[in-house]
Image: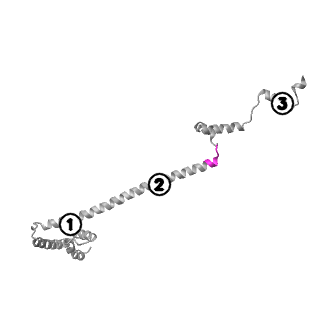
Amino acid sequence: MTCLEAQSNIMGFIDKKLPDDKVTDFVRHVKYCPNCMEELEIHYTLIVGMRELDSNKELSLNFKKDLDEELNRWDNKVKNVKRFKMSTFSIVFVAAVIFFFFMYGQILNKVYHIEQRLIKEKQGKYYFYEQFEDYMPVSQRDIVIDSIELNKPVEKTYYEKIHSYNLTHNIHNNDEE
């Protein structure tokens, strides 16, 4: 805000008719511009003093102090609004980061399980049975053992071997007797 704009807004500030965004710029300018501050003090003292006299109120003893309190009140209001905006932004940002990491972890977990399922499908059902026999659940271990037993050649007893030999060589117990 320029000095000319600030000086044209002095009456609006004193009458409390300036919009909040203009008051913020006005207060900031007046605090750092000694010429505009002096102009504001003069107008504030005259106008507020005349209004107090017209309404038969007790005249203030220190108009400068009243003006400084009003400027500080607006300055604190602006700082509180900025703090609120920064706090809100910080909370939203932190929530977004936490949400992102949570979702990232969930996605990684799903990808991991998909990859493991694909690897398992490629390897077949009993690929690691010999290495992980002790860690397999009982029901799976039984299925594996049963499949191994079914595929294993059946060993014959001594008498069964003799019987099969006799059958193949046409030797019958009855013929020899």
Q: Which mark is residue 71?
A: 1
Q: Quadrant of the N terminus?
A: bottom left
Rendered position, 134 above or below 63: above
**Rendering coords of residue 7 (x, y %):** 21, 75
Q: CA distance from mark 3 to mark 1?
A: 119 Å
Identify which residue is drawn at 82% across, 29% down.
163
Task: Find disc 2 in the rendering and name its residue.
Answer: 103
**Rendering coords of residue 6 (x, y %):** 23, 74
Dot 2 or dot 1, earlier in sequence: 1
Task: Find disc 3 in the rendering and name its residue.
Answer: 165
Q: Is residue 87 left or right of residue 145?
A: left
Q: How is the image coloured?
A: one colour
Q: Amino acid at mark 2?
A: Met
Rendered position, 51 above or below 153: below
Identify which residue is drawn at 49% across, 52% down.
106
Q: Quadrant of the C terminus?
A: top right
The stretch of residues the image draws in magenta is: 120-125
Q: Amino acid at mark 1?
A: Leu
Q: Is residue 22 left or right of residue 112?
A: left
Identify which residue is drawn at 13% across, 68% down.
63
Q: Main secondary structure of the magenta part?
A: helix
Q: Amino acid at mark 3?
A: Tyr
Q: CA distance from mark 2 to mark 1?
A: 48 Å
Dot 3 or dot 1, earlier in sequence: 1
Task: Label 2: state its secondary structure.
Answer: helix
Numbered label tally:
3
153 or 1, which is in the foreground? 153
